[in-house]
Image (spheres, rainbow, N blue to C red):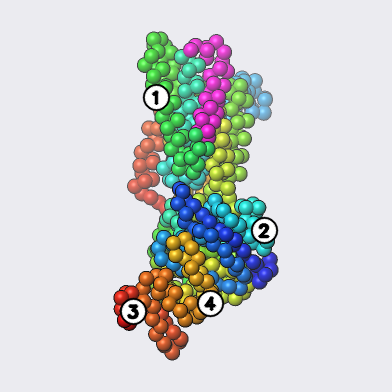
Amino acid sequence: MVGSTNVTSAERPRLRSAAAASGAFLLLLTIALVVVAVLSLMLGPAHLSLSELFLGLTGQSETAAIILREIRLPRLILSLSIGGMLGLAGAAVQGLSRNPLAEPAVLGTPQAAALGAVLMIYSGLADAFSLALPLAAIVGALLAMLATLLVVRRVGGVISLLLIGLMIGSLAAAAISLILSLSSNPYAVTEIVFWLMGSFTDRSMWHVVLSLPFIIVGAAALFWCGPAYKALTLGEETATSLGFDIWRVSLITSAGIALGVGAGTAVSGAIGFVGLLAPHMVRPFVRSDAQAVLLPSALAGAILTTAADVLVKLIPATSEIRVGALMAVIGAPCFLYLVIARPYRLDDRA
Amino acid sequence: MSAATTQLRIDRLSVSLAGRAIIEDVSVSLDGGQFVAVIGPNGSGKTTFLRALAGQMTITGTIAINGTTIERLSLPQKAKALSYLPQDMRQPIWPVPVRDIVALGLMPFDAQAAGDDPAVERQLQDFDLVALAERGVDRISGGERMRALLARAMVGPQPIVLLDEPLNSLDPAHQLRVMALFRQRAESGALVIAVIHDIDFAVRYATRLLAFKDGRLVADGPPQDLLKTDQLSDIFGVAVAQVQTLDGPILAMRPHRDLDRG
């Protein structure tokens, strides 16, 4: 209307600065990621200095190289990839369901993976065959996904998918409680409880080999769905009219999360809050459509999880604190703060 | 994309929901260049008719765009042929800037379309949204949000535009403005089909009225033809009177019994 052209020319730089701002934010996240990664490699029972780290990575120091190859690198790769997957999965479920409170657990995946793992510990198979635990967890996650899809096929709809996932998750959690209460072996109970708290300690390259391919496939599936999450901003009918098959997107999302988060839970145990917290942390800093949030959420998830793992190494305790427990202790107050402060003010900073 | 030749043929269309017939045996042929207002009382099947045209309902009968039934079109193909503003527009949850909401309408043509696309800029001006362009849709009024959603529906070059109750929550000035925009879109060759509750607006701007009652198409024709008969009074159960003004006739509704001329 009146004077609209003037306003437009004034708005353009703001648009460009918004794009530049999210570019700068991505750069900032990447720098933070590198910092926590380097810290994670340096810290441990035997601290490595920056120069020792360099010598170890380039193979010039045999001792440092062994520490890195056998202990620190697998642990870092796992915390980065699993944390990243959790953050990404949280952003994807929130985009799919158009619900800011959704997280990967609403699809039942982590609980089902945990049930598979707990069964292996309970039966003693985990001690007999070291890969039994992660394999059973992956199978658990895939079975949960299959069950969810079989039921949802009869009813359809995103909300049904989430409700059924939630129920399957509750069922898996109840089964874990049942196993715990039935277990006559106190050592097994202790082992199960500790495993459930989540940890990256004593993981080898085998665990990386086991989980990383699933995580990569799962993450690729979620990124592929990105445009559909964006179209879903205005609801399912509009997204369908924009050319997206929302039913297929729901299936691909749940399959991607079952693979990625399932495989992650399989090797690290249950780590909560990352999936919920990461998207909310980055949303105020990016142009906040549901697709734009995916990559920053993955980065934030990786940073959060690796930082928590670094903290675990720093806190002096008789036995190492579990990263999943620490994550929940830090995550809950952080999330409360985000809910109360609601810093979604990107659009109207003036 | 020769919009002027767009033909939408609807043949013996019926839609049932949970065993109840919502639309029964509707046959009508619509062409590019027409601004079609779909009118009728609440629950007469207008929204279902539009959803069926958008290809979002299970139907019996056929709906064909330029000779191709919509069942044979893929979702992306449909999205390129039809733009659809549904009635169910829950408030967007994410604080997405108005500009980016409008850009969503370009996704069928360019998945990466961003808010600085020239087509978006034009819609922002048309729908009086320039001053709100950077504001999050969670922080604007209901009428402003409606304009943003309309701009989203109008931004693409689809030859068919379906709008379900596009005047909802708009103030009078913007109602007039957007009706003129729909008319313009039709004049440029598109087929614009809108569910409109305000009969006066429908009569003044549309080139053709489709009136539904109890799921059936009960009247079809140019507005002036429908006004010559008592059809509108019968359909809506109100008395429709024409008031002559300098700018042409205006329709006024009164309760039906006032009409009893005995």
Q: Residues within 10 Å of mark 4 (few under 14, many from 20)?
A: some
Disc 1 and disc 4: Cα gap in Å? Answer: 65 Å
Q: Nearer the viewer, mark 3 or mark 1?
A: 3
Nearer to us in this view, B205 or A135:
B205
Asked whether disc 1 touches disc 2, contact meaning CB atoms under 8 Å apart, the reply is no
Q: Earlier in the sequence, mark 3 or mark 4?
A: 4
Q: Amino acid at mark 4?
A: Pro
Secondary structure under tag 3 reads helix
* Along the line of sight, the residue nearer the viewer: A38 or A50: A38
Residue A36 is labelled as: none
Labels 2, 3: front one:
3
- Would you say B101 lies left or right of B70 here? left
Magenta region, residue range: A123-150
Mark 2 or mark 3, earlier in chain? 2
Which label lies toward us, 1 or 4?
4
Q: Quadrant of residue A183?
A: top left
- Identify the residue shown where x is 67% and y is 70%: B5
Residue at which label 2 appears: B68
Q: Is residue A87 above or below residue B256?
A: above
Q: Nearer the viewer, residue B142 or A158?
A: A158
| Residue pictured at 56% horizontal, 69% vertical | B192
Which SS type dominates the magenta stretch? helix
Residue denoted by label 4: B222
What subunit carries mark 2? B
Alpha carbon separation for disc pair 1 and 2: 53 Å
